[in-house]
Amino acid sequence: MEDLHVHHGDDLPDNLAWKMFREGDDQAMNVILQRYFRPLLHYGSKFSADRSLVEDTIQDLFLGFLEKRQDLGSPANLKNYLFKCLRNNLIRQVKEKARLKPIEEDDALFTEPTNIQDIIMGLENSHEMSQRISSLFLSLTKRQKEVMFLRYYENRSNDEIAEIMDINKQSVSNLLAQCLTVLRENWVHILFLLLPSQIK
Amino acid sequence: MNKYYNFKAVDFIDDPGFRDWVYGRSQDAAVDWQQLGEAEPSLVHEMEAARLFLKSVAGEQPDVSEDYIKIFGDRIIRKHNQETSRETKLSTIRWYKNPVRLLYMAATVFLAFGLGWYLLLSANRNASEQSGMLAWLRADDKLVNKSNGSSHAEIITLQDGSKITLQPNSSVTYPEVFDGTERNVQLEGEAFFEVKRNPKQPFLVHFNNLTVKVLGTSFNIRSFPNEQSVKVTVKTGKVAVLPDKAGFGVRLLTKAPRAVTLTANQEILYKKGGDRFERAVAINSQIVNSAISEADFEFARTPLSDVLEKLEKAYGIPIIYDEDQVRDCSLTASLSDEPLLEKLKMICKTMDASYETVDGRIVMNVKSCRAAVQ
């Protein structure tokens, strides 16, 4: 009879947690946060290196949900829905911040490579494999980086990525193909330096 | 494993199993990547390049604890509650565009400081009052005090016909006659109350800086000074549990739980000094709907949604489930003469389902109508 006390178990499926949240259960929001706060913060940190900005945006997102909780729909996939909402709000926030402080440098990951020359120099000068590979990754455009993150780190399908980034499915396929081309073309320059002992 | 021998870095990146290994996600991977690298040295370059690239894709993972997220969530809820209460007071006119409003606001701020000061004083006064005086006491009340020093429960009948079953080592204090706008009783220890209904004169039980307010119902309170928490269990009807009225100033200035309403078969557990009530389903839940009896819990090919609806009606406990999940489920079982939670367990046994109690409600998760293969 242990299971009688209030507990907000990990077993509660997303759709039920979301339904309870919509119906006024504040604790259900905490269940959702325990599950998705880390992924949201991680994804969000790619748009801005300012962690407090990302956290504030997540907070405002959920405050918005609380305000119109009765009008919220039931998304097919909660995580994708949260990603999409955070992405929209965060891009707006980052733009706003850039407008207010145009000089401030932002070392977010999903940003355009500023100087392609630097990247090439980095590739040629570095004998460290990890540095070479990270400069290769940095040479991708911000959209390519984002697609890589969603596809490979978050294991989202092309359809899901299209939904989150609000682009069509063909664009996702194109972005992925572009990335793989960049990788294939540059592997050769990188790989000949690798020593077998470097595998862990 | 052969298919990997021709893999290039790009192929490894595209392999979900490889990615899980790199990101440390699965413990029981189908392929032993470490071993593959050792067995086939020509792959080592490709695997290492793929691994490093995937690490770049992921970037640094933010490090946050469960407690941090909990605090984060509670802060959002608090903020939301503050905002909704403020919105009802403020009009849409921007304060700085309206000189009259500015003046009005200055006066409000001034008053707020005064009120704050007053509340601070009264909070201190309340703190000192708690030990001795009863906040609800009126000047002309003649008090009766009953203590139960025996080893068995004692039944007390009040002037209005309400009954108190007082447990050992417990005491109640109340006026000889209830002639005010409220019926007030002070409790220390544990007692079961059966209150005569009177909407004109609410019945209030005060204990441990909390108040239970009812019109007519039956419920149990357990509140011993030497115990860490207090518990209120509702048998029939509806009760409200709120921070004590006397603690108004204290409530504004310190953290105190928000009032909750309990219905039959629900209970709250409150940790003394805490800022929230935890609502739960009572262990010994009884049927509270006289139109439904135990004999009604015989089912033959009954749609599961009907069964859950009947349980909800019978016990007065909300049952939450996904209509889509149970659409095609039906139940053939005899659930009579079992407590509520046993009934639920039996339902879960006949199909691939589980339940949990969350905030005084039951959440059913039906994965499949058919029983899980043992």
Image: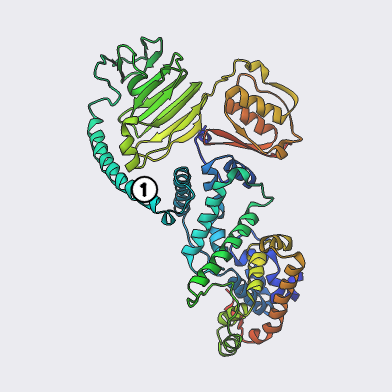
Relative vertical location of residue A61 with respect to residue B179 in this rendering, above or below: below
Going by the image, does B27 lie left or right of A167? left
| Residue pictured at 24% horizontal, 19% vertical | B139
> How many numbered tags mark residues here?
1
Q: In which chain is the residue bearing label 1?
A: B
Going by the image, does B352 lie left or right of B211? right
Residue B171 sits in quarter: top left
Q: Provide residue B62's location: percent of width, then percent of height.
A: 50, 63
| Residue pictured at 45% horizontal, 19% vertical | B215
Q: Is residue A45 visible?
A: no
Residue B253 sits in quarter: top left
Q: Provide residue B302's location: percent of width, then percent of height.
A: 74, 26
Amino acid on which disc 1 is placed: Tyr
Q: Provide residue B340's location: percent of width, then percent of height.
A: 58, 25
Quadrant including the C terminus of chain B: top right
* Residue for badge 1: B104
Q: Provide residue B186's location: percent of width, then percent of height.
A: 32, 22
Q: Is residue B312 visible?
A: yes
